[in-house]
Amino acid sequence: QKEVEQNSGPLSVPEGAIASLNCTYSDRGSQSFFWYRQYSGKSPELIMSIYSNGDKEDGRFTAQLNKASQYVSLLIRDSQPSDSATYLCAVNAGFQKLVFGTGTRLLVSP
Amino acid sequence: DGGITQSPKYLFRKEGQNVTLSCEQNLNHDAMYWYRQDPGQGLRLIYYSQIVNDFQKGDIAEGYSVSREKKESFPLTVTSAQKNPTAFYLCASSGPRDPQDTQYFGPGTRLTVL
């Protein structure tokens, strides 16, 4: 069974700080990695995708991938109260399927 | 506007009833998916379809059925055999022009059993 693990949180950070969200996965053959943001009662929204080792930056968001350690992270710089949500990590599981973690709840306090 | 629509937004089912959740996309995506989300849990795959007239069971297919007669549509039926159907149901799709394996979600249907 392919697994994706995330700390459920909540992760609490003050406004303006860097939030660091982490995810580990079990399948060494995974090639595609995604971060989704989900507000309470809403559907997941794609934030970032990453396919190669290293960092990928998009605005205030940076995804980091380390395939040797089977570890993917999401950094949110200059965190805003509007970033308060649950962040889901997803990893490809072959045949165009994704396996999702249970999500980390982020709380950004003003 | 291209996107994925799901209806209804809220659905109430009596014990023993079958109900059908609608999912439509106009993104010209080949692949479509149904997930179930329970409070505090991640998304679990119910069924997926990579092409019209073909679909495969996901991890929790028991008590559910699907059809894929048109590229744009992938309805999910929750049958009376599903013992605990109260959940948030999410439809997603992915296409060849998007980065590999990327899935986009519809707004979801919240199903409650009375």
Image (cartoon, coloured by chain):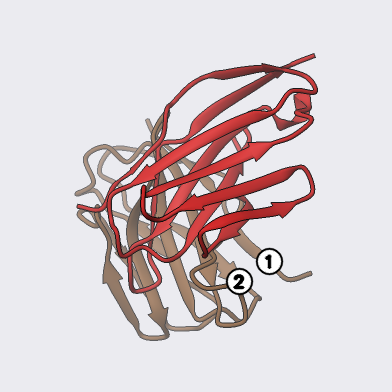
Residue at horizontal 61 percent and vertical 75 percent from the top:
B98
Residue A105, quarter of the rendered image: top right
x and y percent of residue A103 in the render?
Answer: 47, 35
Vertical comparison of A18 with A31: above or below: above
Dot label at residue A54: none
Instruction: Write down the chain letter for disc 2.
Output: B
Vertical comparison of A33 with A42: above or below: below
Q: Quadrant of the N terminus of chain B?
A: bottom right
B76 or A81, which lies in front?
Answer: A81
Q: Is residue A88 visible?
A: yes
A5 or B7, which lies in front?
Answer: A5
Residue A64 shown left or right of residue A102 in the figure: right
Q: Which of disc 1 and disc 2 is earlier in sequence?
A: 1
Q: Is residue A44 visible?
A: no
Whole-angstrom CA distance, mark 2 to mark 1, is 6 Å
Instruction: Write down the chain letter for disc 1.
Output: B
Residue B87 shown left or right of residue B26 in the figure: left
Crowding at mark 1 (Cα within 10 Å: few <14, some 14-19, many 20+): some
B83 or B35, which lies in front?
Answer: B35
Q: Colour of chain B?
A: brown
Dot label at residue B25: 2
x and y percent of residue A12 in the render?
Answer: 61, 16
Vertical comparison of A80 with B54: above or below: above
Crowding at mark 2 (Cα within 10 Å: few <14, some 14-19, many 20+): many
Q: Which chain is red?
A: A
Q: Secondary structure at mark 1?
A: loop
The residue that mark 1 highlights is B3
Total count of labels? 2
